[in-house]
Amino acid sequence: MDTKLGIKTRLNRVFREVFDDDSIEIFDEMTAKDIPEWDSLMHIILVVAVEKEFIVRLNAAQVGQLKNVGEMLDLLEKHNNR
Amino acid sequence: MDFLSIKFFLFFFSSIVVIYLSPVRYRIRVAFPVLNAFFILTYINAPSQLWPLVVFLAAGFAGVRLVETWANRGIFLTALSVILITFVYLKKYTFISFAHFIQWPYLSVGLSYILFRMVQMLIDVYQKSIQERISPVSFFNFCCNFLTFVSGPIQRYQDYKIQEASLGQKALKDTEAFDCFVRMIHGLFKVVILSTMCLNYHKYLIVSLQGSIVNASSLWLCRKFILASSFYTLYLFFNFSGYMDIVISFGRLLGFQLPENFNRPFASRSFLELWSRWHITLADWFKFYVFNPFLSLLAFRWPNREAVPYLGVLAYFLTFFIMGLWHGSSWMFLIYGLFLGAGVSVNKLFDVLMRKYFSVSYNKMIDHSLSGLLGAAFTFMYFSMGLSCFWLDFNGLAQLMGKFKIQGFLVIFVLGGLIGAVVMFLMGLVRDVFDRALVKSAVLLGNFYFVRAWLSFELLMVIAFWFYGFGEIPDFVYKGF
C-alpha cells in the first residue's frame, strides 16, 4: 500500500507524461489554470492515465467534481486504503 | 398554473409561510412533498392527465431501487433503457410516430427535467457515488421540487440533499431578503418588459417574412432573418434568465441555494465558451454524464496522445447533438442538434489545428479586444441562427433553404456577425456612459435611496406593462421543453 508521498510521486510522473513536461511539480492547490494545456479534453486524458497508473475506476461524479490536485490525491488515497 | 399569474406568486409566497411554520420534523417529510404535489396538481384539470407522470416517476423509482439492491450492469442498463424509452414515448418524438400514443391530453411539463434527475440518480447509485438508500419521499421531492420542476436549474441529487437539509432552517438577514426581492423584481422586469418587447418585434418581423420568402430580394430576406433570429435569442435570454432570477430568489427565501444558469452569455467569445455561460446546469450535466464518459471510453480504446484532440472533437459533436435533440420532439430539433454539434466540434477542431500548426490556442487568439469582439458577435450570430429551429417550421426552413442555399446562410452568418460586432461595440460605449451616469446618480442620491428609486421604477414599469400591457406577455418559454 502506497503512502501519500508515494501516491504524489506517481501522480507527478503521470502529470509529466500526460502534459509532456518534465518540469511539472504538482502541489495540492494546483488547478487547470496552472498548466496552459490542461483543458477539458486533457482533463479526461489525465483521468484515464491516472486510472491506468493506479488501477482504479473513477466514476462520472468524481471526475466532474475534482477541483484541484489535492482533491485528486485525497481520492486516490481513499481508493488505496480500500 | 401560468408563470405570470397572481396564483403563481401567491403559491410561492404561501409556500414560504408553510415551510417556516411547519414543525422541523415534518418539514421535509410532509410539508415539502405536499407543496410539490399541490404545485403539480395546479397544472391539471382531470386525474387522467397525471397518470403518465406517475408512471414515469414510478419507473424511475423502481429502476433506482433495483440498482441500489443489485448493483448489476444488466439491471442498470435495463432500468436506464426503460426510463429513456418511456420518456421518448411520452414526449411523442416524431421518429416514433408509428407508435400508438396515449390519446387523451396529459401533463408533459417538467418531464424533460425529471429525466435528467432520474438518469443522474441511476448512474450515481450504480457507480456508488450515492450510497444512501433513497426513500420514496426523497425521490419525489428531488424529482418534483416545485422550485425546479418546470425547467430547472438542474441539480444533482447529492447537492439537492445538502440544500434540502437547510430548507427553512436559516433565518435570512434583512439585507439578504432585500437582495432576493431586488433580484425578483429584476427578473420580472426582464420577463414582463424586455422579453415581451423582443418577442413582439420578432413576431412583427416574422409576419413580414411570411409570404415574402419567394418574391422578396435576397438582401431584404437576409436583413429580416438576421433581425428576427437575433431578437428571438434576446427574447429567449430575457425570458429564461428572468424566470431563473425569480426562482433562485424564491429558493433563497426558503433557504434553498439553487445553482446559477446564466453568466453574461453574450460575452462569450466562442461557441464552446457560450456553453459555460448559457443554461450552465444543462451543459454541466451533459459534461458529467455524456461527454466525460464518452471521451474516457474513446481514450481507453485509442490511447494515442496524438489522437486525443480529434476524439475530443467527436465527443463534443455527439454530446451537443444529443443536447439539441433533447430540446424537442420534432425533426427541427434533429437539425438543431446537428447545428449545435457542428458548432462546438468545428470550434474545437479549429483550436486543435491552430495549436498544431501555429502553436497558438483559440483562447489566446481571441484574447484581444478586436478579436474578442468579433468572436462574441459571431458566436451570437451562430447561436441565433441555430435557435431559428425553435420558431421556424420545416416548411419555412425548406423555403429559406431553397432561397438562400448553403452559401446564402454563410453570407448571413458573416454579415450578421460583422453587423453584430458594430452593434456590440456601440452598445459597449452606451453601457459605459450609462454605468457612469448610474454611479453619479448613486453618489448624488446616496446608494440607499438610489437602489430603492431604481427598484420602484422597475416595479412601476412591470405593473404598467402587466395591467395596461402593450401586447400579450409571453409565458415561460422553456416550460414547453
Image (spheres, grey):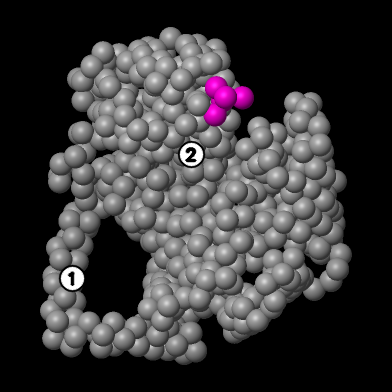
Q: Main secondary structure of the magenta part?
A: helix
Q: Is residue B275 depicted above or below A33 in this figure?
A: below
Q: Quadrant of residue B276?
A: top left
Residue B246 percent coordinates (x, y): 49, 71
* Residue at screen point 13% across, 79% down: B440
Q: Which quadrant holds the N terminus of chain B?
A: bottom right
Circle number at residue B253: none
Q: Which quadrant holds the C terminus of chain B?
A: bottom right
Q: Nearer the viewer, residue B101 or B429?
A: B429
* Residue at screen point 34% across, 49% down: B380
Q: Nearer the viewer, residue B389 or B425?
A: B425
Left or right of residue B4: residue B421:
left
* Residue at screen point 86% across, 64% down: B48
Q: Residue B211: in sight, yes or no?
A: no
Region of the chain picked out in magenta, as a range: A78-82
Residue B359 percent coordinates (x, y): 21, 20
Residue tagged by mark 2?
A65
Same chain for mark 2 and mark 1? The answer is no
Q: Secondary structure at mark 2?
A: helix
Q: Nearer the viewer, residue B146 or B345?
A: B146
Are the two marked residues, 2 and 1, in contact with CB atoms closer than 8 angstroms?
Answer: no
Residue B357 percent coordinates (x, y): 23, 16
Q: Is residue A52 depicted above or below B40 in this figure?
A: above
* Residue at screen point 81% across, 64% down: B49
Residue tagged by mark 1?
B435
Instruction: Bin the neighbour count of mark 2 within 10 Å (Cα to Cα): few under 14, some 14-19, many 20 and up.
Output: few
Chain containing mark 1: B
Chain containing mark 2: A
Q: Residue B279: in sight, yes or no?
A: yes
Left or right of residue B267: residue B303:
right
